[in-house]
Image: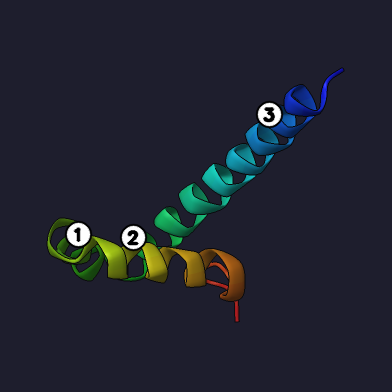
């Protein structure tokens, strides 16, 4: 395999993992504060993406203490 093919596979794996983490964060954000999440998604998308990243990586799912 060439270096370009290996690099492409690594990038695809990284993008797939990032997508899974993003979806997890979106579900957590909408389950905690659905109205605020909707408004952020519509009007303040960069802040919403930061919020989703923090939800997915650092906060426990809603319902757990």
Q: Are marks 1 and 2 in contact (CB under 8 Å)?
A: yes
Which sits in the foreground, 51 or 8?
8
Residue shown at 47% from the left, 48% from the top = 23
Which sits in the foreground, 53 or 60?
53
Disc 2 marks which residue? 30
Q: Where is residue 14 in the image (x, y as percent from the top left)?
A: 66, 43
For marks 1 and 3 on the same chain, the one whose residue lies earlier in the sequence: 3
SS state under label 2: helix
Above or below, 12 against 52 in this view is above
For marks 1 and 2 on the same chain, the one whose residue lies earlier in the sequence: 2
Is label 1 or label 3 in front?
Answer: 3
Above or below, 17 against 47 in this view is above
Asked which quadrant contains residue 35, the reply is bottom left
Disc on res. 38:
1
SS state under label 3: helix
Can residue 29 be seen here? yes
Residue shown at 39% from the left, 71% from the top = 51
Q: Position of residue 56 (x, y in %)?
A: 54, 63
């Amino acid at each position: 395999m060439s270096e370009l093919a290996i690099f492409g596979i690594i990038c695809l794996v990284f993008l797939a993992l990032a997508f899974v983490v993003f979806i997890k964060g979106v579900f957590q954000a909408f389950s905690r504060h659905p109205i605020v999440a909707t408004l952020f998604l519509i009007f303040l998308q960069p802040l919403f993406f930061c919020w989703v990243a923090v939800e997915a990586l650092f906060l426990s799912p809603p319902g757990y203490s």
